[in-house]
Amino acid sequence: MKRLEQVKAAVLAAAFGSLATPARAGGGGFARIQTVFDNVNTSLIAAGVVIMTTVILWVGWKVAFSGATFQDMSKPLIGGIILGTAPVLAGFLMS
């Protein structure tokens, strides 16, 4: 009976001991995932900046050289602002 109690204690100690230590088989899996999320976050913010810059340049070109008014270009400008801020907001929510 005493031997059974010792085996139980050893099994429980091994089980709780393995839960308390980090998993060795992962090989830094969380660090890799964090790196992927950081890269995606950077890409999303860069895409938002590119979209916003392109829209502002296009609207400015139309107003300055094509005779369009700001009223004519308000809908593309608002759409570009929404499309440009969406990836930036997604990047901020991911971080």
Image (cartoon, grey):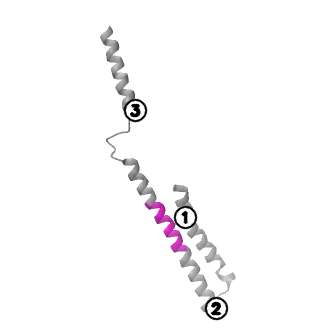
To which residue does mark 1 refer? 88
| 33 within the magenta span | no
Q: Start and end of the magenta stretch?
A: 39-51
Crowding at mark 1 (Cα within 10 Å: few <14, some 14-19, many 20+)? many
Q: Amino acid at mark 2?
A: Gly
In the displayed structure, 52 sits above or below 15; it is below
Q: Amino acid at mark 3?
A: Leu
Residue at label 2?
67
Q: Name which quarter of the figure residue 11 lies in.
A: top left
Left or right: 44 with respect to 27? right
Q: CA distance from mark 2 to mark 1?
A: 32 Å
- Dots 2, 1 in contact, CB < 8 A: no
- Disc 3 element: helix
* Residue under the image location 41 percent in, 56 percent down: 35
What SS does tag 1 mark?
A: helix
Side of 1 relative to 86 (left or right)? left
